Image: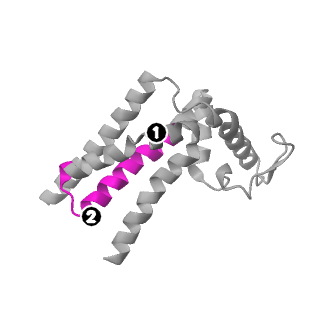
Amino acid sequence: MEWVKRMHTTVWLTACGALFLLTVIELVKPHAFFWYDNFTYFLPWYEFNYNAWRHGEIPQINFYSYMGHPCLTAGQSGVFYPPTFLSVALAHLFHQPGLGMKWLAWIHLAAAALVVERLARLLGSNASQSMVLGWLYLSLPFNIGAAQLWVVVAYTILYVPWIFLCLELLLR
């Protein structure tokens, strides 16, 4: 069971390193993940979807944006993506609209670092190499910059390595 303890150590160290990096970004640039399209485009969209579901309706068309914008046909709207509902609920709970977007970006980026760490371990890297690879993937300028502008890119940053990890597990 020694390998289980080592595995948990590398996972925790990767997660702590990822959260530390995201905290540094937030300290250097407050509200780093709550500006541009995250504030003007995605937050109202997620808010509309949340309120529609809360009233028992499927959010089909948002008549408050762009003279009627379809929600169901746009994948970015996150109509059926549970983390978007949790982020809006969290924002309502603490009365801070930016908290939900920050939570969405942080969770997806930190999880991406963990997935890359697991993928690197699966492909033969040792513990320290895999942790560094997870942190490096998280800290890529494109990943941080794009997630600050568009929270949906943070989803992609997580799910692309996750798909590779699943493929590698299936092919073994």
Of label 2 and label 1, which has the lower sequence position?
A: 2
Q: From the viewer's perspective, is residue 95 above or below residue 117?
A: above
**Residue at the location (79% across, 54% down)?**
60
Answer left or right for 54 relative to 141.
right
**Coloring scheme of the render?**
one colour
Mark 2, residue position: 122
**Residue at the location (58% across, 41% down)?**
150
Label 2 – label 1 distance at C-alpha: 25 Å
Q: How many residues crowd mark 2 within 10 Å: few (<14), some (14–19), many (20+)?
A: some
Labelled disc at residue 64:
none
Mark 1, residue position: 144
x and y, in percent, of residue 129 in the image: 21, 50
Q: Amino acid at mark 1?
A: Ile
Instruction: Work out which quarter of the rendered image holds the N terminus and state it.
Output: bottom left
Quarter of the figure with residue 46: top right
**Residue at the location (71% across, 42% down)?**
45
Instruction: Work out which quarter of the rendered image holds the C terminus and state it.
Output: bottom left
Q: Main secondary structure of the magenta part?
A: helix
Q: Amino acid at mark 2?
A: Leu
Residue 78 visible, this orientation: no
The magenta segment: 103-128
